[in-house]
Image: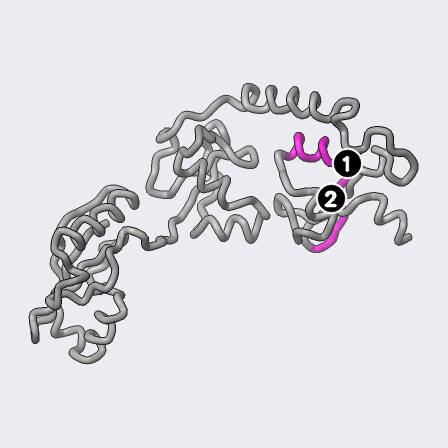
Amino acid sequence: MVIYCTTNLVNGRRYIGLDSKNNPNYLGSGKAFKLALAKYGKNNFRKDILTHCKDIETLLEKEKFYILRLNAVNSKIYYNIAEGGGIIITRAVCQYSRSGKLLKCWNTISEVENELGFNNSKITAVAKGNYGRRTAYGYVWRYKEDDFNKYPVIPQNKVYQHQKIALSKRMTGKGNPMYGKNGINSNRYSTVNQYDLKGNFIKTWNTITEATLELKINNISACCRNQRDKAGGYKWKYFKDIVRSS
């Protein structure tokens, strides 16, 4: 990961940018710079490395630092038209078990969301170590360039025990949204069926809560209400809806 300065060998104008892969063939991507690149050709540009960075956060900070220090946005010598430091870079993310076993690496967090139905903001929070969040959906997530032990991980039994107790208290008596309801609105109709993405039946769960705690999957109810296509890599349907349609 580097901050670089690309110089136009014809007129001396320059461009400050970042390169997360340190690709020698990558010269820059600013709008004004691209126009110049098309006009003069790659052979008339030279790329020099200003500094190396160990992580994305530092890379963004350093890009902004050099652009401001050199007054690149306001100077006619430079092609830069923005202060930098706010570029969104897609980062590969790896999925681990709590014990540290690598399960899979994904090209982007959005790819995880599209395939498994997991909320990308929660995965991002774990990967960045934000808000003290240690896991998301029962897994530990780390950016590919980061070590598994970059942030501490709470053992599984300690993580979920307090969640189960809190959920049990919230769903007891009047705290349960189904309290006092009968017939078709009874708790027994929160039973859900689990299917694979091809629609093949897998299992019937007595309640959404049971499936959520056992599989560590959120958004099951949203799937049953047709607000999401899938959750945790599965399709879900209320048992009551299946009964009505049969």
Residue under circle 1? 205
Q: Earlier in the sequence, mark 2 or mark 1?
A: 2
Residue 165, label in figure: none
Residue nearest the observer in this picture, 95 or 226: 226
Q: Which amino acid does label 1 sit on?
A: Trp
Which one is nearer the viewer's eye here, 71 or 124? 71
Compared with 162, 15 (above or below) is below
Element at badge 1? strand
* Amino acid identity at mark 2: Gln
Residue labelled with disc 2: 194
Which percent across, then down, holds residue 150? 35, 31
The residue under the point 49% across, 29% down is: 98
**Position of residue 128 in the picture relative to residue 34 (left or right):** right
The quarter of the displayed image where residue 93 is located: top left
Residues drawn in magenta: 198-215
Tell me if residue 71 can be seen.
yes
- Callout 2 crowding tier (Cα within 10 Å): few <14, some 14–19, many ≥20: many
Whole-percent x and y of residue 157? 57, 20
Question: Does the segment drawn in magenta span residue 37?
Answer: no
Q: Do the numbered discs 2 and 1 sit on residues whose CB atoms are within 8 Å?
A: yes
Above or below 204: residue 175 = above
Magenta segment includes 214: yes
Q: In this view, does 219 lie above or below 30?
A: above
Residue lying farthest to the front in this orientation: 74
Residue 198, how many percent across, how many down? Answer: 70, 55
The location of residue 168, given as percent across then percent down, is 70, 22
Query: What is the C-alpha distance between the residues marked 2 and 1?
Result: 8 Å
- Looking at this view, name the residue that lies furthest to the bottom: 39
